[in-house]
């Protein structure tokens, strides 16, 4: 095996600084991997957006590790590991993502990057590491075995070889916004009629209103364990107003437009559900669906459809350049998948959610 050196990459204060070269090389490598996988630039993130998103914060420690072929500091970067460590909850966990340039694959680079990241996680007291693999395709028709949706390709084989176990399968779906909107409008009207007069929609763009931020933090906290987790050993996240503001600041730094529709229960004044869309201004044609949640006590009132259809209507009005929306849902989450299918989302691939035990091996 060619000698591989693993070194940390510092997140610079600015891209124009003399110490930004390695970070820029990492940003370019990550973008090249996304373009290679998807065959388009829908997931391209400008270096400035990556800079805003990669720094450590009060709630998350973020590390970058670069692989070079050779020991010299001027050797080209051929791989990167991203390690995220929660600091306010789930202190037994971390998440890792390993990317290797095409010309350096199958030479042990990815394994060395993972080992270095795992050592950092173990030194920080973490016992579980989570990772994600992406796979294009519609999956096996009619299969009820969610694991069968993840092919045993190079990404899955790499994860298994490192000791990861597949714990959850997410469906990746896309909604084409270029077609006729009659269906979305009709679904919004039907959901509004079904939900009844006891609920009120609340919309904001960017920052959550001060008078709602504590209630919104509770929704974000509930979302962390409300979605199916499969076998992932995750506990409820700790959210408060400060964490909401931190997330909003990160989005602003990444030049993202965030659209939130929430639903308020008029009898109690409580927020009982929300949904989030994100659009990066460098490519407003591409939209990403984030959280959607309705609290248990208020399900069965079509609030999930009401929230999503209403936020998509806001999206069309505010960002007419939007052309498609990506979303991820656990394959076992039939309720949310049914809503998405009615709205017109279609599967384009699957993500495997993996977990490794650092105390083993």
Image (cartoon, rainbow, N blue to C red):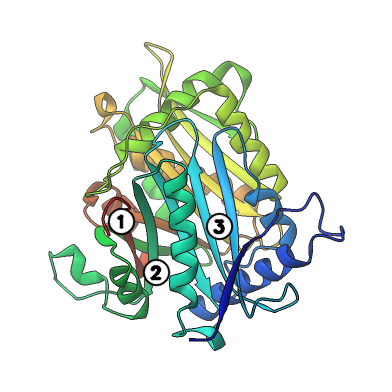
The x and y percentages for residue 320 are 64, 57
Residue 217 relative to residue 58: left or right: left
Residue beneath the point at 28% across and 64% down? 163
The residue singled out by tag 2 in the image is 134
Residue 140 relative to residue 172: left or right: left
Q: Is residue 361 above or below residue 227?
A: below
Find residue 349 and report its image quarter: bottom left
The x and y percentages for residue 329 are 33, 54
Report helix, strand or loop for mark 2. Answer: strand
Residue 188 relative to residue 73: left or right: left
Disc 3 or 1, which lies upstream in sequence? 3
Disc 2 or 1, which lies upstream in sequence? 2
The residue singled out by tag 3 in the image is 287
Find residue 205 and report its image quarter: top right
Residue beneath the point at 36% across and 30% down? 222
Q: Is residue 9 above or below residue 30?
A: above
Q: Work out whether residue 214 or residue 125 is closer to the camera in this orientation and state it.
A: 125
Q: In which quadrant will I find the C terminus? A: bottom left
The x and y percentages for residue 154 are 35, 80
Tag 3–tag 1 contact (CB < 8 Å): no
The residue singled out by tag 1 in the image is 356
The x and y percentages for residue 137 are 34, 77
Q: Work out whether residue 214 or residue 15 is closer to the camera in this orientation and state it.
A: 15
Instruction: Tell me the crowding category of disc 1: few under 14, some 14 to 19, or many 20 or more residues within 10 angstroms, Cα based.
Output: many
């Amino acid at each position: 095996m060619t000698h591989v050196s693993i070194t940390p990459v510092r997140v610079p204060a600015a891209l124009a600084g003399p110490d930004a070269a390695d970070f820029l090389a990492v940003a370019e490598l990550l973008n090249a991997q996304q373009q290679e996988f998807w065959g388009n630039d829908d997931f391209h993130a400008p270096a400035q957006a990556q800079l805003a998103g990669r720094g450590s914060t009060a709630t998350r420690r973020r590390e970058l590790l670069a692989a070079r072929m050779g020991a010299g500091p001027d050797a080209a970067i051929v791989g990167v590991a991203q390690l995220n460590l929660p600091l306010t909850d789930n202190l037994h966990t971390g998440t890792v993502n390993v990317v290797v340039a095409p010309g350096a694959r199958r030479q042990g680079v990815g394994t060395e990057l993972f080992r270095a990241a795992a050592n950092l996680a173990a030194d920080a007291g973490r016992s579980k590491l989570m990772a994600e693999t992406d796979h294009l395709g519609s999956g096996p028709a009619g299969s009820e075995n969610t694991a069968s949706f993840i092919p045993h390709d190079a990404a899955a084989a790499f994860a298994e070889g490192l000791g990861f176990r597949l714990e959850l399968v997410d469906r990746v779906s896309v909604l084409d916004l270029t077609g006729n909107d009659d269906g979305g409008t009709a679904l919004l009207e039907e959901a509004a009629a079904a939900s009844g007069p006891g609920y009120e929609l609340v919309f904001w763009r960017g920052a959550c209103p001060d008078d709602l931020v504590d209630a919104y933090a509770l929704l974000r906290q509930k979302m962390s364990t409300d979605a199916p987790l499969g076998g992932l050993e995750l506990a409820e996240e700790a959210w408060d107003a400060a964490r909401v503001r931190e997330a909003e600041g990160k989005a602003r730094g990444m030049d993202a437009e965030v659209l939130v529709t929430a639903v308020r229960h008029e009898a109690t004044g409580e927020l009982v559900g929300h949904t989030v869309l994100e659009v990066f201004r460098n490519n407003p044609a591409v939209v990403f669906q984030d959280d959607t949640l309705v609290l248990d006590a208020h399900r069965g009132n079509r609030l999930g459809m009401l929230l999503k259809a209403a936020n998509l209507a806001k999206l069309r009005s505010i960002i007419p350049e939007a052309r498609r929306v990506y979303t991820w849902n656990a394959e076992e989450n039939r309720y949310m998948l049914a809503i998405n299918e009615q709205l017109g989302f279609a599967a384009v691939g699957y993500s495997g959610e993996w977990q490794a035990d650092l105390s083993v091996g």
